[in-house]
Amino acid sequence: MSEDRVDSTFHAIATEQVNPRTLTIDQLSTIDMLTLINQEDAGVAPAVAAELPSIARAVDEIAQRMRNGGRLVYCGAGTSGRLGVLDASECPPTFGVEPGRVIGVIAGGAEALVKAQEGAEDNRELGHGQMSPWEMV
């Protein structure tokens, strides 16, 4: 797939769009703001429920690969990247997973854990550099 096609596909993803229902959230009263957040949050469980078969397939595939000596690599930017690094760091002490079997990679590197690195997720060279040590296939 060409980079242009990847870019256009990526930018069409709903999570990369502005939510029209929250455009004026900063102008709402506190109760209206909290109500709106609660309404938006209410859509999460049904969205996850609709994807449970796909999620189950992914979990089964990952588990099989882990049993065969593979690794799980979390990649993310911003908060999602921080959560991936956090989860990866908890796997050895919590589940007895060998260090290096579950890896967390955050766009922008270690500094991005404590200070936002705006635009790091869009930097192909940086991403390649961060992933190359892991010898991904």
Image (tube, rainbow, N blue to C red):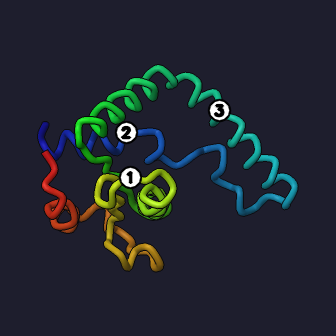
Residue drawn 71% across the image and 56% down it = 25
Which label number is shown at residue 97?
1
| Residue carrying label 3 | 45
Q: Position of residue 62 (x, y in %)?
A: 33, 35
Question: Amino acid under label 1?
Answer: Val
Along the polypeptide, which appears first: circle 3 or circle 2?
2
- Please report whichever mark, 3 or 1, sits nearer to the chain's N-terminal start: 3
Left or right: 8 as drawn, with respect to 34: left
User: What's the CA distance linking mark 3 and mark 2?
Assistant: 22 Å
**Seen in the image, is 122 located left or right of residue 134?**
right
Q: Position of residue 55 (x, y in %)?
A: 45, 29
> CB of mark 3 within 8 Å of CB of mark 2?
no
Q: Which quadrant would the C terminus be assigned to in this image?
A: top left
The Cα–Cα distance between marks 1 and 2, rounded to whole angstroms, is: 37 Å
Where residue 57 sits: x, y (%)?
A: 39, 24
Identified at 51% across, 56% down, the residue is 94
Q: Three-letter amino acid code at disc 2?
A: Ala
Where disc 2 sits, the SS reads loop
